[in-house]
Image (tube, helix red, strand yellow):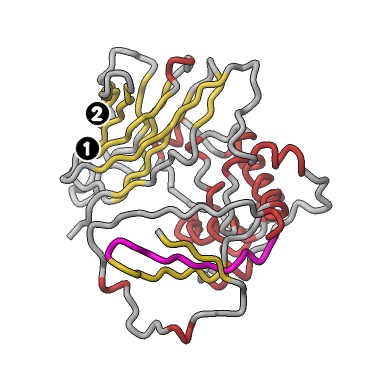
Amino acid sequence: MRGLPSMRDSLTNPVHVYEGDDALITCVVKNIGDNSVMWKKEHKERLSARVLTAGTTRVTSDKRFAVLHDSVPANERADVQSGGDVWVLVIKIVKSSDSGIYVCEVNSNPVVRSFHKLSVLSKALQPPENGSDYNFYEDQKPSFSSKNHNYTECCQNRNVSLNCLGFCNIQSILEGSTGQDPEHCENDFPSIVKCMADGRNHVPCCVQERVPDICQDVCRGEYTAITNNIKTHFSCSAYTEQTLACIVEGIELLPSAPDVIEVEALTENTLKVSWSNPLSNLETVTMYNVNVTSLRTFDNRLIDPDDEDATKIKTHPKRSIKF
């Protein structure tokens, strides 16, 4: 039995595009089943949303809007699910009035939505500040003695295929000496990219380097396969060097992920979340963000009855928050 469709909300990672350029807003939908995807734009004053596309069909009269999505031809096997996970809203030659919140909506029951913020910038301006992230990169960019970031041990721990370990070293990727065709390592890329990002958010740097939203998954340590039809319209290969440079830079500058994260249910409405300080670059931490997702049901198969407190590491100072 197929579960409900699921998405990644990207409001925390807004898309910044300069006026006159093309905007690409990416929606990744898992388990879409027989449902359809619609793109809408919110209209705050009218408390409504304007439908832009339904499936791959443009609904709005504005011909600048289109959808990139890969679908399986009707003459192929019936048991092959039509379409990939990626639905890209394309806005040609963006204008300042295109700024706002765009909604990717699946007409499932219940309806599932993700929200995406687009900011159209004047070409006379630099990318906007997002807290201290952008200034952080500008002020602290060092001259790196090495462009290398080797995460082979992490890849081995995640059971990456032996033939694909060449992708677990950024210098090998940049030099083209991985020893393997990327297509042969497609199944290993989710683990490889997760190890590469090392639990750090490299998106601010990628935004500053004008890496498009459709190519920013790697910047956040995620991997989404882009299907063939989308590849014929758009390729992320032109942004590989910028993306990898941001990751190398982030490993040097950004704190690693908090360690030993634990969640304790205190009451039906209260959780206690505790964690240990990051092991790398702790001095750069100014605040912690705790994101909470409400689930309709839990899968009991994912709960390990043998996971006792004895397995918890308690050697690092803990921080905790109740909410």
- The one nearer the camera, 199 or 191, is 199
Q: Residue at x 71, y 48 (%)?
A: 249
What residue did someone put label 2 on? 54
**Marks 1 and 2 in Cβ contact (< 8 Å):** yes
Label whose residue precedes the other's in the sequence (1 or 2): 1
Stretch of the chain drawn in magenta? 268-281
Q: Position of residue 162 (x, y in %)?
A: 57, 69
Residue in the image at 57% along x and 50% along y: 201
**Label 2: how many Cα within 10 Å (few below 14, some 14–19, many 20+):** some
User: If the image is split into quadrants, where does the N terminus sit?
Assistant: bottom left
Helix, strand or loop status at disc 1: loop
Q: CA distance from mark 1 to mark 2?
A: 7 Å
Residue at point 47%, 51% (across, down): 223
Nearer to us in this view, 223 or 176: 223
Specify the quadrant of the image occupied by residue 177. Answer: bottom right
* Marker disc for residue 36: 1
Q: Secondary structure at mark 2?
A: strand
Query: Looking at numbered disc 2 in the image, what kind of residue is underneath it?
Result: Ala
Residue 255 or 32: which is nearer the viewer? 255
Left or right: residue 94 versus residue 282 is left
Q: Amino acid at mark 1?
A: Ser
